[in-house]
Amino acid sequence: MEVFTKVKPREKKIIGRQPKWTAEYMHMVAQKVVEEGMTYRVAAKTFAISTGAVSAWTKKYKKGNLLQSAKDKEQSPDYKIYQLEDQVKELKTEIGDLYLQNQMLKKALFHSQMKKKENSSVITSENLAQFQKAAK
Protein backbone atom coordinates (compact mmCIF):
# COMPACT_ATOMS: atom_id res chain seq x y z
CA MET A 1 0.00 0.00 0.00
CA GLU A 2 1.39 3.37 -1.00
CA VAL A 3 1.05 6.45 1.10
CA PHE A 4 0.42 9.63 -0.80
CA THR A 5 1.42 12.96 0.62
CA LYS A 6 -0.26 16.15 -0.36
CA VAL A 7 1.69 18.29 -2.76
CA LYS A 8 1.99 21.85 -1.55
CA PRO A 9 0.79 24.40 -4.06
CA ARG A 10 3.41 26.85 -5.26
CA GLU A 11 3.51 30.07 -3.37
CA LYS A 12 2.53 33.19 -5.24
CA LYS A 13 5.40 35.46 -6.16
CA ILE A 14 4.88 38.98 -5.00
CA ILE A 15 4.87 41.32 -7.95
CA GLY A 16 6.24 44.81 -7.58
CA ARG A 17 8.38 46.37 -4.93
CA GLN A 18 7.91 47.70 -1.46
CA PRO A 19 6.63 51.28 -1.38
CA LYS A 20 9.18 53.87 -0.33
CA TRP A 21 6.78 56.46 1.08
CA THR A 22 3.93 56.34 3.55
CA ALA A 23 0.40 57.43 2.73
CA GLU A 24 0.71 60.47 5.00
CA TYR A 25 3.87 61.59 3.20
CA MET A 26 2.19 61.31 -0.21
CA HIS A 27 -0.82 63.21 1.11
CA MET A 28 1.38 65.98 2.51
CA VAL A 29 3.27 66.45 -0.77
CA ALA A 30 0.08 66.48 -2.86
CA GLN A 31 -1.55 68.90 -0.42
CA LYS A 32 1.38 71.33 -0.72
CA VAL A 33 1.12 71.25 -4.52
CA VAL A 34 -2.66 71.66 -4.70
CA GLU A 35 -3.44 73.96 -1.79
CA GLU A 36 -0.26 76.01 -1.49
CA GLY A 37 0.38 76.31 -5.21
CA MET A 38 3.82 74.67 -5.23
CA THR A 39 4.92 73.56 -8.71
CA TYR A 40 5.74 69.95 -9.52
CA ARG A 41 9.39 70.80 -10.10
CA VAL A 42 9.83 72.68 -6.84
CA ALA A 43 8.05 69.93 -4.91
CA ALA A 44 10.20 67.29 -6.56
CA LYS A 45 13.41 69.13 -5.64
CA THR A 46 12.23 69.95 -2.13
CA PHE A 47 11.17 66.42 -1.25
CA ALA A 48 13.79 64.60 -3.40
CA ILE A 49 11.28 62.66 -5.50
CA SER A 50 10.47 62.54 -9.19
CA THR A 51 8.08 64.96 -10.85
CA GLY A 52 6.11 61.98 -12.16
CA ALA A 53 5.45 60.81 -8.62
CA VAL A 54 4.35 64.30 -7.60
CA SER A 55 2.05 64.44 -10.60
CA ALA A 56 0.50 61.05 -9.88
CA TRP A 57 -0.01 61.86 -6.21
CA THR A 58 -1.67 65.20 -6.99
CA LYS A 59 -4.02 63.56 -9.51
CA LYS A 60 -5.07 60.99 -6.90
CA TYR A 61 -5.36 63.74 -4.28
CA LYS A 62 -7.68 65.76 -6.51
CA LYS A 63 -9.85 62.69 -7.10
CA GLY A 64 -9.90 62.07 -3.36
CA ASN A 65 -8.59 58.53 -3.43
CA LEU A 66 -4.93 59.05 -2.52
CA LEU A 67 -5.32 57.97 1.09
CA GLN A 68 -7.84 55.28 0.19
CA SER A 69 -5.56 53.59 -2.32
CA ALA A 70 -2.58 53.89 0.03
CA LYS A 71 -4.59 52.48 2.94
CA ASP A 72 -5.82 49.66 0.73
CA LYS A 73 -2.22 48.84 -0.12
CA GLU A 74 -1.28 48.92 3.56
CA GLN A 75 -4.16 46.61 4.39
CA SER A 76 -3.40 44.19 1.58
CA PRO A 77 -1.72 40.90 2.51
CA ASP A 78 1.10 41.56 0.03
CA TYR A 79 2.03 44.78 1.82
CA LYS A 80 2.00 43.00 5.17
CA ILE A 81 4.26 40.33 3.69
CA TYR A 82 6.66 43.06 2.52
CA GLN A 83 6.71 44.55 6.00
CA LEU A 84 7.30 41.20 7.66
CA GLU A 85 10.06 40.28 5.19
CA ASP A 86 11.76 43.60 5.89
CA GLN A 87 11.47 42.98 9.61
CA VAL A 88 12.95 39.48 9.19
CA LYS A 89 15.92 40.92 7.27
CA GLU A 90 16.58 43.47 10.01
CA LEU A 91 16.38 40.81 12.71
CA LYS A 92 18.72 38.49 10.79
CA THR A 93 21.33 41.21 10.45
CA GLU A 94 21.00 42.02 14.15
CA ILE A 95 21.41 38.34 15.05
CA GLY A 96 24.51 38.16 12.84
CA ASP A 97 26.02 41.21 14.52
CA LEU A 98 25.31 39.83 17.98
CA TYR A 99 26.81 36.47 17.00
CA LEU A 100 30.02 38.13 15.81
CA GLN A 101 30.25 40.20 18.98
CA ASN A 102 29.78 37.07 21.06
CA GLN A 103 32.56 35.27 19.19
CA MET A 104 34.93 38.21 19.65
CA LEU A 105 34.21 38.33 23.39
CA LYS A 106 34.82 34.59 23.70
CA LYS A 107 38.18 34.96 21.94
CA ALA A 108 39.16 37.90 24.14
CA LEU A 109 38.25 35.95 27.27
CA PHE A 110 40.21 32.92 26.08
CA HIS A 111 43.34 35.00 25.35
CA SER A 112 43.16 36.84 28.68
CA GLN A 113 42.95 33.52 30.52
CA MET A 114 45.90 32.16 28.55
CA LYS A 115 48.06 35.14 29.54
CA LYS A 116 47.21 34.64 33.21
CA LYS A 117 48.16 30.97 33.01
CA GLU A 118 51.46 31.71 31.26
CA ASN A 119 52.54 34.31 33.84
CA SER A 120 51.66 32.39 36.98
CA SER A 121 52.35 28.75 36.21
CA VAL A 122 56.14 28.42 35.92
CA ILE A 123 58.87 30.24 37.79
CA THR A 124 61.69 31.12 35.43
CA SER A 125 64.69 33.40 35.64
CA GLU A 126 62.65 36.10 33.90
CA ASN A 127 59.86 36.21 36.50
CA LEU A 128 61.88 35.09 39.57
CA ALA A 129 62.08 38.63 40.93
CA GLN A 130 58.30 38.86 40.86
CA PHE A 131 57.90 35.84 43.14
CA GLN A 132 60.71 36.91 45.52
CA LYS A 133 59.04 40.24 46.17
CA ALA A 134 55.88 38.56 47.33
CA ALA A 135 57.83 36.35 49.78
CA LYS A 136 59.35 39.28 51.72
Image (cartoon, grey):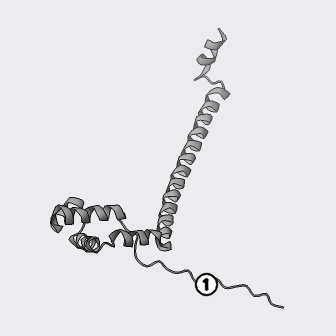
Residue at image x 48%, y 73%? 78
Residue identifier under label 1: 9
Where is residue 54, by image quadrant?
bottom left
| Residue appearing at x 61%, y 40% in the figure | 110
Image side of residue 91 versus residue 134, left or right: left
- Looking at the picture, which amino acid does disc 1 mark? Pro
On the rendered image, what quadrant is the N terminus found in? Answer: bottom right
98, above or below 35, in the image: above
Q: Where's the C terminus, which quadrant?
A: top right
Which one is nearer the viewer's eye here, 118 or 100?
100
Q: Residue at x 50, y 73 (%)?
A: 77
Indicate left or right for 93 with 5 as reference. left
Q: Nearer the viewer, residue 78 or 3?
A: 78
Q: Position of residue 13 (x, y in %)?
A: 49, 79
- In this orientation, does residue 21 appear? no
Task: From the top left corner, tell me how far across and down residue 65 is, in percent.
Answer: 33, 73
Q: Is residue 36 above or below residue 105?
A: below
State the residue in front, 134 or 25: 25
Q: Quick check: 37 above or below 3?
A: above
Please name whichever residue, 99 or 128, is drawn nearer the observer in this view of the structure. Answer: 99
Q: Residue at x 58, y 35 (%)?
A: 112
Q: Position of residue 44 (x, y in %)?
A: 20, 65
Single out the residue that lies furthest toward the top.
Answer: 136
Taking the image as shown, residue 125 lies to the left or right of residue 94, namely right
* Element under disc 1: loop
Q: Crowding at label 1, few (<14), some or many (≥20) Cα neighbours within 10 Å?
A: few
Q: How many marks?
A: 1
Image location of residue 16, percent across then percent down: 40, 76
